[in-house]
Image: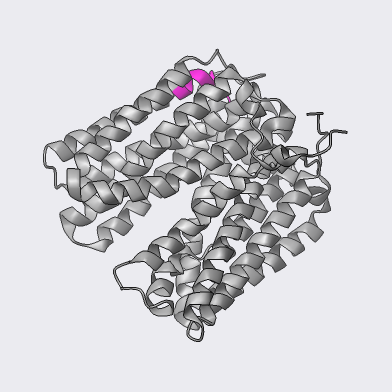
Amino acid sequence: MTRPTISHLFADTRPLRNRHFRRLWTANIVTVIGAQLTVVAVPAQLYADTGESFYVGLAGLFGLVPLIVFGLYGGALADVFDRRTILVVTTLGLIGTSALFWLQAAAGNTNVWLLLSLFSVQQAFFAVNQPTRSAVIPKLVEPHLLPAANSLNMTITMAGAIAGPLVAGILIPIVGFKWLYLADTVTLFATLGAVLALPSLPVLDAATGVPGIRAVVHGFVYLRTQPVLMMSFVVDLIAMVFGMPRALFPEIAHLGFDGPDEGGIVFALLFAAIPAGAVIGGVFSGWVSRIERQGLAVVVCILVWGGAMTAFGVAVGLADRWMTPMLVVALLMLVIGGAADMASAAFRSAMLQSAADDAIRGRLQGVFIVVVAGGPRIADTVHGATAAAVGTAAAAAGGGVLVVVGVVVASLAVPSFVRYRITRAPA
């Protein structure tokens, strides 16, 4: 057995030895920043054009519906057609919609429905692209390196979630929306080049013909017969629905830590803390490739997440007595939670990619995208309603407690999930 060294603390970069994965990952460094520019620019333009938060909130609905519909159906497509072809088509679609974002902004468009429609089309292409991209990884990377590969991908995504909004916030007053959209368009060509360089990626034992609703339903039927895979979704929903307190950040920043009602530094720090924790967790993710009991690892990570969110709520509750120390504690708990969530997601993705048959992998990745996107949105509603009744501190702390209780109950109900393990290949 190889004795762990200091180098083992850092991210396992062995997946980058595969030139195709390396091209995709390297291109994503550029592309994710551009994507985040658009993520910020769309709601900012909506508010600038209308002066109403209603339309900004409406963008969530216009984005969520195609994400669910095409996330599920896109997974079915990825289980029939050559996955390289799907990636090429959807990447071209993303480039086209980004270019249209630039064109409407350059033309001085103020029609909110045109902007929302473009956003929906973009999310539809994204929803097909992402399950396909995830389903491709097991074709490029050895099974024991899947957690490391997913950690590398998530580190870049979360780094973009920090850098993109900061860059956009600085540039919008200076250059306007159109140049942000143009930057997104240009950076997407990096991903297109990496996708075009992929070999043909046909699906093993793929069905014939264009898939319909029956193919989507079959994915859920298959999932019912796989308790370990089903549990990977259940525990994530428990963690996100009960434990994601982001809807409370504006009120916590304003009332708990005396920030201005329109935002401010505390507001920005609260929103950046979880992604920052995920990035730190990704940098020091060398350990994930050495874990064999992946089911138990997921449970432990979610327990850490729940504990961190409980402590976060307690710190918020004590802010009126010791404001500055409790702000430090609150941010630290969010960072710890972000690191735990990153590790949990890396393991859950690896379990889906390795435990599922290739002919069904795309559909399960589609469900994964819907759960990852939908869970936090449900959490926003749940936490907002709960905080209105019991306050932000109790809502956040209570949610963390429910995460811990819920995951323990789920683990006892399906012990095969906790026992799930892989055989680790030597380094």
Name the residue at the front extreme: 6
- Image quadrant containing the N terminus: top right
Q: Nearer the viewer, residue 200 or 327?
A: 327
Inspect the magenta stretch and tell me whether residue 100 lies in it. no
Please identify the residue farthest to the bottom as the structure is shown: 321
> Magenta stretch?
79-87
Q: Position of residue 312 (x, y in %)?
A: 57, 71
Residue 47 occupies which quadrant of the picture? bottom left
Q: Position of residue 88 (x, y in %)?
A: 43, 21
Residue 260 in the image, given as x and y percentages of width and height? 31, 73
Residue 320 left/right relative to 298: left
Q: Residue at x 69, y 55 (%)?
A: 301
Left or right: 304 as drawn, with respect to 251 = right
Is 326 placed above or below 415 here? below
Say whether residue 186 is left or right of residue 153. left
Estimate the x, y position of residue 293 in percent, counting from the top left: 81, 44
Residues 45 and 227: in front is: 45
The single residue placed furthest to the left in the displayed view is 108
Residue 268 falls in which quadrant of the image?
bottom left
Above or below, 376 relative to 361 = below
Residue 112 in sight from this viewpoint:
no
Q: Is 94 placed above or below 381 here?
A: above
Q: Which residue is located at x 45 percent, y 56 percent?
A: 272
Q: How many marks?
A: 0
Residue 1 visible within the image: yes
Q: Colour scheme of this structure image?
A: one colour
Question: Quadrant where the C terminus lies?
Answer: top right
**Residue at 51% from the left image edge and 82% from the top image edge:** 322
Question: What residue sits 55% from the left and 24% below the top?
Answer: 22
